[in-house]
Amino acid sequence: MAKAIGTKKTLLALGIAMLIVSFGFMVFFWGKLSISAKPTNLIHVACVGDSITEGSGYPAHLQAMLGDSYRVGNFGVSGSTVLLNSDTPYMMQPAFQKAKAFQPSIVVIMLGTNDAHEITYQSIENFQASYKKLIAAYQELESKPQIWLVTPPPIFENELSLSEVNLEQGVIPQIEQVAAELDLPLIDVNTVLMDYPEYFGDGVHPSSEGAMLIASEINQAITSNSVPDTGP
């Protein structure tokens, strides 16, 4: 009798072990199916910019709008400028290299707010040369991305020494000129946000509502135009 009971316990233990192993194989199998079901040829969108890109949340809103066929990367750097002869030129930041390593299909550049700083603006005559150098660095990538230039949001009353006059009369006209000379598309979020000062608590950085408007404009521009083939 004792031997029979021991045999039953052994068989029961073996049965349980087999069930555990079988369950493990099922989890692995379904996990593989889930992974393979995810898109493999995602369209990479690199959001290049300053603190408005880094901290406003617009890249996250853009990701939600574009959907699962896209992967949006946030490569914003607080305080960064287009101008190379400033304290924080974007091209000298680690995010610049990370954005290139991202091998984007689309690059969205929204810089210029910090170039309107009272001190930085003293070198504004170098803006176009610096901007073209930044653009060229992305155009030379193996992924051959589309480049979208974006006018920065308006600057309202602030305590950051950022000048709306410098932005509107100096920075934005030069961005527009570069876009025209290089035949690049331009997204004008400046005009869209001009009537919403309430979205800028400190006069410079947009709220979530402002970020949503930025993302909406960029989403509309991207999805209304063809994007490069991302390969097989």
Image (spheres, helix red, strand yellow):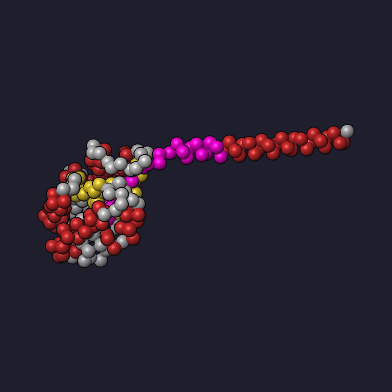
* Image position of 231 with respect to 138: above or below: above
Where is the C terminus found, in terms of image quarters?
top left
Q: Give the residue furthest to the left.
A: 169
Whether 46 is among the magenta residues is yes
Q: Looking at the image, can residue 194 be seen?
A: no
Of residues 133 and 206, the one drawn nearer to the viewer in this rendering: 133
For residue 184, side relative to residue 141 (left or right): left
State how many labels appear. 0
Residue located at (33% from left, 46% from top): 44
Residue located at (30% from left, 58% from top): 96
For residue 77, side relative to residue 5 (left or right): left
In magenta, the rendered stretch is 28-53
Of residues 155 and 150, the one drawn nearer to the viewer in this rendering: 150
Residue located at (28% from left, 42% from top): 228
Residue located at (51% from left, 39% from top): 32
* Image position of 230 with respect to 78: above or below: above
Q: Looking at the image, can residue 231 be seen?
A: yes
Picture coordinates of residue 81, whole percent (x, y):
23, 59
Of residues 106 and 119, the one drawn nearer to the viewer in this rendering: 106
Q: Give the residue furthest to the right.
A: 1
Where is the N terminus found, in terms of image quarters?
top right
Picture coordinates of residue 130, whole percent (x, y):
20, 60
Of residues 159 and 6, the one drawn nearer to the viewer in this rendering: 6
Whether 185 is among the magenta residues is no
Picture coordinates of residue 125, whole percent (x, y):
13, 62
For residue 151, side relative to residue 33 (left or right): left
